[in-house]
Image: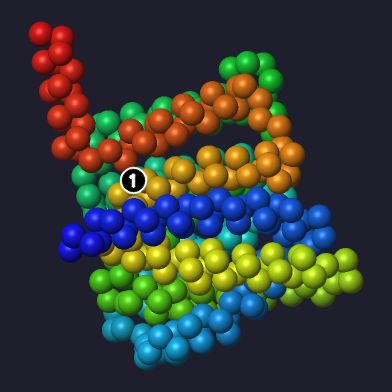
Amino acid sequence: MRSHSVLVPISLALVVLIWGLNTVAVKALYQHISPVAYLGTRFLTLLPLVYLLARFTGHKIELKEGTLKQLLAASLLGFGIPQLLGYIALDHTSAFASSLIGATSPIATLAICAVMRYETVTGARWLGAFICITGLLIFQGCFTGTLTTQGGEGMALAAAVMASIHTVMVGRLVRHYHPILLLFWIMTLSALMITPFCLGSLLAQSWSAVTIADWSLILGSAILPILVGHPLWHWAIKHLGAGASSLWVLLCPLVAGTFSVIFLGAKVYPHETLGALVALSGLLLSQLPREKLVKAVAYLKRARS
C-alpha cells in the first residue's frame, strides 16, 4: 500500500530515536541500580504490561502450530541473553560505544541468512562487513596507538551477534503472528527464562538508593522501547523485510552518541568519530540492495567513459 511507504520510515525513525535515547537513559540509571537488577525489574514490569496490551487490543493469546521452536530461539537466543549481555556491557563501556557495537547486528544477520540460505549475500555486502570491522578497530584506537577498552566491548559484540537471531526469526514469525501478539510471546518467554538469573541481584539491590526519577526512567525504558518500539519494529519488518529494516539500526549510535554528550557529558575523540563514520559507511554498504549497487556501478562506468 502507498501509505506504508510513508508510515514505515516514520515508524522506523521513531524506533531509532526511542532505542538510542534508551541507551543513554539506562546508562544514567546505573548510578543507583546494578545492570542485572535493572534487567530483572524491567522484565517483571513488562510481564503484566504485555499481557494487558495484547488483551486490550483484542488479540487471543494462542500459540500458532509449528512456531514454538522459532519463538524460543527469538526469545532466549535473540532477545533474553542479548539483553543480559548488552546491559552488563553498557555498565563497562560508554553509551556511544555500546550503541555503535550493537549496530553491527545487521552484519550477523547477513551471515545467518547466507548460511541458512534465506537470501543471497552479495560480495558488496561482505565488503561492507569488512569496512565495518575496520571502523570498529579504528574506533577502539588500534591504528593510532591509543587502544582503549573498558571491558564491555566483547559482551556488547556478542549481544549484537545474538540479537541478529531475533531479527531473522521475527522476519519469519510475522507471517503467523500480529506484531503485538508476537511481542507478547517473545517478552513472556524471555522473562520466564531470564528473570530467575536476576533474582540474586534483585535481592542484593539497595532499593532505597533508587529515586522517584529512577523509577520513572525504569518504567519509561519498559514502555517506550518495548511496548512502543518493538511492535513498530515487527510491523516494519513485516512490510519492509528484515534486511531493509535492520538498516535503520545504523542510526542508533548517532542518536545515542549525540544525547550521551548532551545529558551525560561524554567526550568523543577524533579517532572515535572517524571510526564510527567508517563503521557506519560499511554497514550502509552491506545493506544496499543489489539493484542499487548494479545501477551505481553502471553509472560510474558511464561517467568514466
Residue 231 to residue 299: above or below = below
Q: Which residue is mark 1?
A: 110
Quadrant of residue 14 in the image? bottom left
Name the amino acid, label 1: Leu
Quadrant of residue 143 in the image? top right
- Image check: 75 left or right of 153? left
Q: Residue at x 62, y 21 (%)?
A: 270
Quarter containing the N terminus? bottom left
Q: Residue at x 18, y 18 (%)?
A: 300
The answer to whether residue 63 of the structure is visible from this angle is yes
Quarter containing the C terminus? top left
> Could you tell me residue 134's position as x and y percent?
48, 26
The answer to whether residue 198 of the structure is visible from this angle is no
Q: Residue at x 60, y 40 (%)?
A: 258
> Could you tell me residue 47's position as x and y percent?
58, 81
User: SS at mark 1?
Assistant: helix
Q: Residue furthest top?
A: 305
> Could you tell me residue 175's position as x and y percent?
25, 71
- Image check: 85 left or right of 115? right
The local crowd at label 1, few if under 14, some if 14 to 19, many if 20 or more residues have their Cα within 10 Å, is many
Residue 203 to residue 115: above or below = below
